[in-house]
Image (spheres, rainbow, N blue to C red):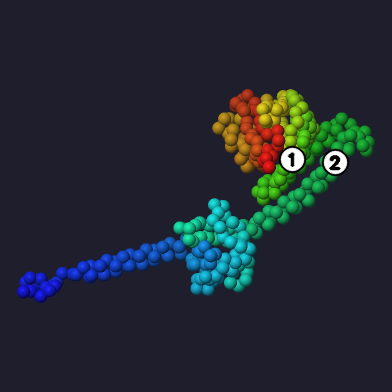
Amino acid sequence: MPETGATPGGGKSQPTGEEDLKSIVRKQAAALADQGNRMRNILHSIPLGLVVFNKRQSIELINTLAQQLLHYEPRELKGQNVKVIFPEVEMLQFSSDPVRTMARKKTGEIFPVEIYMNEWNDDLIFAHLQDITERHRLERLRQDFLAMVSHDLRTPLSSVQLFLQMISRGTYCEISSNFERSIVRAESSLDLMVSLVNDLLDSEQLDSGDFNLDIQPTTTNSIVDKAINSTQSGANAVGVKIEKDVVNDSLNADEDRVTRVIVNLIGNAVKFSPKESVITVRAGIEGTQVVFKIKDQGPGIPEHLHQAIFERYKQLDQPKETKRRGVGLGLAICKAIVERHKGKIWVESEEGKGATFCFSIPTDGGRTPE
């Protein structure tokens, strides 16, 4: 009889079941090792610094870019607490929004970062780091510039405005009609400069989130009258009349901010209105909303631009004779103020038939019930 494992005719023996199993295990181990290497290569090739934490807030691994940012070797951080590299963070938690904080290098140097976090199988937190040192520097420069604008431009402009108003009222002496017209033009130019400065400062407040409302009882008449008084001289200078049609309703709102919206909308209407035309300001309660409407007799706005005009720095083509040009922030600021009141803003217009800018805010000012 042939020996066990030998083939009839003296050939090699066939593999046993145990050998088959060992071969399968070796192949699976090789495949797992290859998959692990590929995953490691992917993690190290990510164009952001990556630090992987476990649920105990201990570091599991870091990729190549994180090593370069933090100046640590992986073995030096393995098992270390989150506060070693993020001294201001008590605990990392998944967030859909980036978290801005400070990171600490091995040398002790502190630098600003944004962290984008993702969870993996409820066991690991992947923290992607982005060095924002340059962005942080530019933001500081912007803040310094705006502080300069506020102090070194707005304050003297306000002083000159007051001086011109006193001259036009005859405080110092009687003035001729020609001189008075010159004063009116100067006041109009100063109004434009002050408006541009205010737009820049409001835009910065919107970016920084430092844009709080002071909700107090007020009336539609009070708001509209203040807005018309602020824009009357500019309208007179270009021969445009402002009329109002207001039901004197009570509401809760940030009066100064809502007045600013109407001032911007009237200013826009004046800019596009032909001489001897009329701008009408309407206001009144409709249901639970207070609705304001500013209607002009200008060239109108194409329908495809009804939404775009509320974007920052978006400006319509203006007639060559237009003297008052802005930077495209006014309507974006109006939109932000209205939305902070939990309201909405829109435009009703057909090209060639004028435009009506409308906004509504709740009579309670958008307060959230406690």
Say which quarter of the image contains residue 186: top right
Q: Secondary structure at mark 2?
A: helix
**Residue 42 vertical placement versus 302 (above, below):** below
Report the number of discs. Answer: 2
Per the image, the residue denoted by label 2 is: 162
From the viewer's side, name the closer residue of 111 and 62.
62
Q: Which mark is residue 243?
A: none
- In the figure, is residue 151 to the left or right of 353? right
Instruction: Name the amino acid, label 1.
Output: Ile
Q: Secondary structure at mark 1?
A: loop
Mark 2, Cα crowd under 10 Å, few <14 / some 14-19 / many 20+, is few
- In the figure, is residue 49 to the left or right of 269? left
From the viewer's side, name the closer residue of 200 and 206.
206
Residue 260: image x %, image y %? 73, 38
Which residue sits furthest right? Answer: 173
Cα distance between the residues tagged 2 and 1? 29 Å
Residue 58: tell me if it is visible. yes
Residue 275: tell me if it is visible. no
Say which quarter of the image contains residue 356: top right
Residue 253: image x %, image y %? 73, 37
Residue 175: image x %, image y %? 90, 33
Q: Where's the C terminus, which quadrant?
A: top right
Per the image, the residue denoted by label 1 is: 215
Q: Residue at x 67, y 46 (%)?
A: 206
Q: Residue at x 62, y 71 (%)?
A: 108
Callout in the foreground (2, 1): 1
From the viewer's side, name the closer residue of 18 and 239.
18
